[in-house]
């Protein structure tokens, strides 16, 4: 992190990422993880 060169507009976000302890993902277009059926997964991967 300290050696990376980020654009000025992204430096604040890079610092926040460094301090992050949790990842939150919100995706309205796909079903994540254990809720996927085999049929659904195959259809998504076929795209």
Image (cartoon, rainbow, N blue to C red):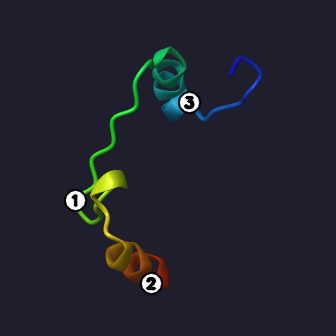
Disc with the residue nearer the chain's start (2 vs 3): 3
Q: Position of residue 19 (x, y in %)?
A: 49, 14
Question: In the figure, 38 relative to 5: above or below?
Answer: below
Q: Observer-nearest residue: 34 or 18?
A: 34
Single out the residue that lies furthest toward the left: 28
- SS for callout 3: helix
What residue did someone put label 3 on? Answer: 8
Camera-side mark, 2 or 3: 2
Q: Residues within 10 Å of mark 1 (few under 14, many from 20)?
A: few
Camera-side mark, 1 or 3: 1
| Cα separation between marks 2 and 3 | 36 Å
What residue did someone put label 1 on? Answer: 28
Disc with the residue nearer the chain's start (1 vs 2): 1
Q: Dividing the image into 4 quarters, which one contains the N terminus?
A: top right
Q: Dividing the image into 4 quarters, which one contains the C terminus?
A: bottom left
Contact between marks 1 and 2 (CB within 8 A): the answer is no
| Cα separation between marks 1 and 3 | 31 Å
Q: Residue at x 52, y 19 (%)?
A: 15
All told, the count of numbered labels is 3
Question: In the figure, 3 relative to 23: above or below?
Answer: above
What residue did someone put label 2 on? Answer: 47
Q: Observer-nearest residue: 39 or 6?
A: 39
Q: Residue at x 44, y 18 (%)?
A: 21
Q: Position of residue 35 (x, y in %)?
A: 27, 57
Q: Residue at x 33, y 43 (%)?
A: 25
């Amino acid at each position: 992190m300290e050696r990376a060169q980020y654009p000025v507009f992204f430096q604040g976000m890079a610092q926040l990422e460094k301090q992050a302890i949790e990842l939150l993902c919100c995706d309205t277009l796909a079903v994540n993880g254990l809720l996927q059926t085999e049929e659904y997964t195959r259809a998504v991967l076929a795209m």
